[in-house]
Amino acid sequence: MTGRGSRSVSLRSVFGRTFREEGHALVGWVVGLVLYGATMLAMYPTVRGNKDFAKLLDSYPKALKTLFAITDYTSGPGYLRAEVFSLLGPLLLIIFAVLWGGDLTAGEEERGTIDLLLANPISRRRVVIEKWLAMVAGVAVATTSLGLTLGLGAPLVHLSVTWAELGAAVVATVLLAILFGTVALAVGAGTGRRGVARGSAAALAVTAYLLSSLSELVTWLRHARPASPWYHAIGVDPLRNGFLVAHLAVLVAVALVFLVAAVVLFERRDLAT
Amino acid sequence: MTTAPQSGGLATIAVEGLTKRYRGGGGVTDVSLEVRPGEVFGFLGPNGAGKSTTIRLLLDLIRPDAGTIRVFGLDIRTQGVAARRRIGYLPGDLSLYPRLTPRELLTHFSHLRGGLAWNGIAALADRFDLELDRPIRALSKGNRQKVGLVQALMGDPDLLLLDEPTSGLDPIVQHQVHDVIREAATEGRTVFLSSHVLSEVAQVATRVGLIRDGRVVSIEQVEHLRGRSVHLVEVILAGGSERPPWSNIEGVTVVDEQGATVHLEVSGSIDPLVAALARCRLADLTVREPDLEELFLSFYEQRT
């Protein structure tokens, strides 16, 4: 019997289907990020109770400490900044966002499903925006899972950090990852090629990271620092300074510029067969 | 080349001076055609002639270098969403979401089309005997093609754009597809059908556009096409059979004669030849339609 249509809510929109298609991957990422967060927490008691370790870190050259965001390493926020939010945490989430963002429209073009999708009475703009929203939701879920792990696990290892401090770091990381994911979307929408989209967004993310972290050391780079999204998300230290609306607004604005670019580029193109 | 409208009112498809060239070659050049409501228009040409390019232009998936496209009187570039609300499309190179089941894919598209009733979709799926609950990646090519057909036909769209709809289907299902196309036309809906198979187009279409190398060579009523087409006949006479006076038979030309095997070309009715052969003893008899190349050649010869 043919019965009735599928009841699945995820099939009611391009947003839902896109989110669902990446569902397995998202679960994998969430598991990975939870394990990563738990591992970082598990290492904290060793660091905190160890005076020699603190001395060793103190003896590091200043440049090295600056580069790896090691200040008040044994405090809760200081530890999380150095171990999670200065590089590896955001980097993982950027990879997640760029892989997905590059696939949003370019993946459907390369797999040939875009013809059937856009033969439906929906505009290209709607497809781009719904797919972008799916990525935004995915990045938010993944980052939040890391933040929750750290926040819920912190008391167990006597790491003192407030939800406000963590929340500020999570929001900044979400926006940073979305920004580079949107770059990948825009390049993919303009070229129809996943590899180009992911590669160029990843290259941009690495370049921006180097600009932001090296500018802490190199005086003449200081002026260029605001050009890097990493500076607005991580360089301004949300774990210590909380929600810095002006800096977060820069991240949102840049992401939206790339979203508009994605729509415009996608609307103009001949879609690949 | 434009054919005169058959009746008043708005054309379902009106294409004027459509050109789309690709850097690597291919595309279409200066295509003009008009398809009226209720018509089954066959778009006939060899692979790579520009059939799929034309259909993808009609859907605004690619954009023309020159020319205008109106579907239901709507400019496809600016009012594409409104036009596509009334179009069902089957791509020639069909790609479906492999992780979804047919039921999920059809549900998804029915939502994107504003929420179609499942009953009609279920009836189509039943008619094509489509398995709804296995992932599409596990389906055979023929079953995937059925998914493509059902999603194109669901919601009874006013215009069906079918790009090689019977490719990969077994003859029984091909027949069903032809039935569905005829029914759609009977209900006053319009079908634009591309094919590289002359007999398919001849069976279902009312008018045929012949396209080759991106240019529409001719647009003909299907009876006209059939009338001017020749039959190619191969006769192998049995030993001791009487040998008919081939060239005296009406409409028959001898192409080649070697021993008992004779190749003939028959224009017009095949009946005089059959009557003549009735007096012979045959080892074998083959009658076939000319292939597309031969058909196109006959049109070129007529024009020069």
Image (cartoon, rainbow, N blue to C red):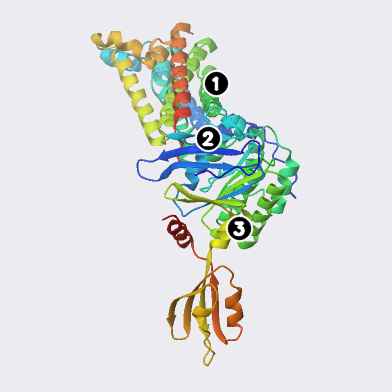
Q: How many C-alpha atoms fall within 10 Å of the one at disc 3: few (<14), some, or many (≥20)?
A: some
- Mark whose residue sits in front, 2 or 1: 2
- How far across and down, in percent of the image, does residue B160 sit? 62, 44
Between residue A64 and residue B160, name the one nearer to us.
Answer: B160
- How far across and down, in percent of the image, does residue A36 sit? 46, 28
Asked if residue B59 can be seen in this view, the reply is yes
Q: Real-space Cα distance between discs 1 and 3? A: 73 Å
Q: Tell me the residue at 52%/24% (across/down).
A: A136
Q: Secondary structure at mark 2?
A: strand
Q: Tell me the residue at 59%/76% (across/down).
A: B272
Report whether A271 appears left or right of B222.
left
- Mark whose residue sits in front, 1 or 3: 3
Q: Is residue B280 above or below residue B130?
A: below
- How far across and down, in percent of the image, does residue A225 sit? 32, 11
Q: Which residue is mark 2?
A: B69
Between residue A102 and residue B106, name the one nearer to us.
Answer: B106
Q: Secondary structure at mark 1?
A: helix
Q: Which residue is mark 3?
A: B223
- Mark whose residue sits in front, 3 or 2: 3
Q: Earlier in the sequence, mark 3 or mark 2?
A: 2
Q: Which residue is mark 1?
A: A148
Q: Chain of mark 3?
A: B
